[in-house]
Amino acid sequence: SKRQWSLSDFEIGKPLGKGKFGRVYVARELKSKFVIALKVISKEQLEKYRIHHQLRREMEIQFNLKHPNILRLYGWFHDSENVFLILEYAHNGELYKELSKKGHFSEQQAATYILSLTKALAYCHEKHVIHRDIKPENLLLDHEGRLKIADFGWSVQSRSKRHTMCGTLDYLAPEMVENKAHDYAVDNWTLGILCYEFLYGAPPFEAESQVDTFKRIMKVDLSFPSTPYVSPEAKHLISRLLVKDSSRRLSLQRIMEHPWIIKNANPMGVCN
Ligand SMILES: CC[C@@H](NC(=O)c1cc2[nH]nc(NC(=O)c3ccc(N4CCN(C)CC4)cc3)c2s1)c1ccccc1
């Protein structure tokens, strides 16, 4: 739909969340009554942090990605102060809130989310997009509990560029932490981190300080607690993803065919 949107087309509801750059509100398009999420980024912030190129990349990338596990960007508009992104509304909010509420997910729930993420990443890599920032905060749940990857602010089209990383190191692959040029395999590493966190409730290389997390990542200092119980198949998958040599990490295709995924994941992506 190539129509020109404006703020007067929407009734703005409660704030949903705020990130480093901008805020998101639930909103309803007045004519259709369709509920969306409206992401508002001030032009002043765009100038101040010089992120308009990143925002343009995010918009081009997310606008062209159409997949059941990727949050849709329906369109955008701007006025004198702000840029507005019209995003799909995920009715059940942030996956990490559900994770912290439950402590850890069952193997069925974890495998279903990992399969959804793997399918979404396979789709992205087919389109030469590397997300690079898959973490629980960027994962949302729709009204059926289906996982949606949000916030492509850090994604890149094809080959990686040097970039400064903000936020936690926990999800970064060794090659990113070492600030080496990296490729699609960073997202495979992150799947291993998330699989571990879904099953144990905390990421594998968590430490008191960022320096210690850095050291644990570089050493791939991986250990599995004795509780909660996690099957050997799940540990095998995690161990085949958290591999320092990015060329030896299990491919997305092989993750989809892994015995633990086949046995535990709900192919429909919903599991309640
Ligand atoms: C992922 C971060 C990113 N977020 C988005 O783009 C976002 C896009 C988008 N679409 N739908 C959302 N839904 C929610 O955020 C949401 C949160 C809580 C909800 N509930 C609370 C608990 N209750 C029991 C059920 C309802 C429901 C929906 C969000 S966030 C961002 C980036 C920059 C600035 C702000 C936000």
Image (spheres, grey):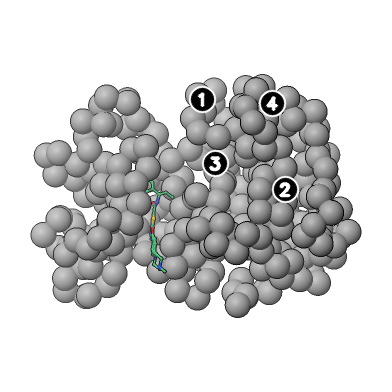
| N-terminal label among 3 and 2 | 3
Amino acid bearing label 4: Asp
Residue at (41% x, 59% y) in the render: 72
Pick whichever, 194 or 228, lies toward us: 228
What is the secondary structure assignment of the residue under circle 2?
helix
- Residue under pointer 4: 212
Residue 67 percent across, percent down from the top left: 52, 62
Relative side of 36 to 13, left or right: right
The earlier-in-sequence mark between 4 and 3 is 3
Q: Residue at x 19, y 45 (%)?
A: 78
- In this view, the residue in front, 170 or 192, is 170
Q: Which mark is residue 192?
A: 2
In the image, which disc is placed on residue 163? 1
> What secondary structure is marked by label 4?
helix
Q: Alpha-carbon neighbours of circle 4 within 10 Å: few (<14), some, or many (≥20)?
A: few
User: Which mark sits nearer the N-terminus, 1 or 2?
Assistant: 1
Question: Label 4 vs label 2: CA separation?
Answer: 19 Å
Badge 3 is on which residue? Answer: 133
- Image coordinates of residue 126 in percent, x first then y, are 61, 50
Q: Is residue 114 visible to us here? A: no
- Residue 56 picture quarter: top left
The numbered mark, 1 or 3, whose residue comes first in the sequence reads: 3
Dot 3 amino acid type = Asp
Mark 1: secondary structure: loop
Q: Is residue 233 left or right of residue 142?
A: right
* Quadrant containing the N terminus in the rendered view: bottom left
Q: Are marks 1 and 3 in contact (CB under 8 Å)?
A: no
In 3D space, how far apart are the residues under numbered discs 1 and 4 (Cα atoms)?
Answer: 22 Å
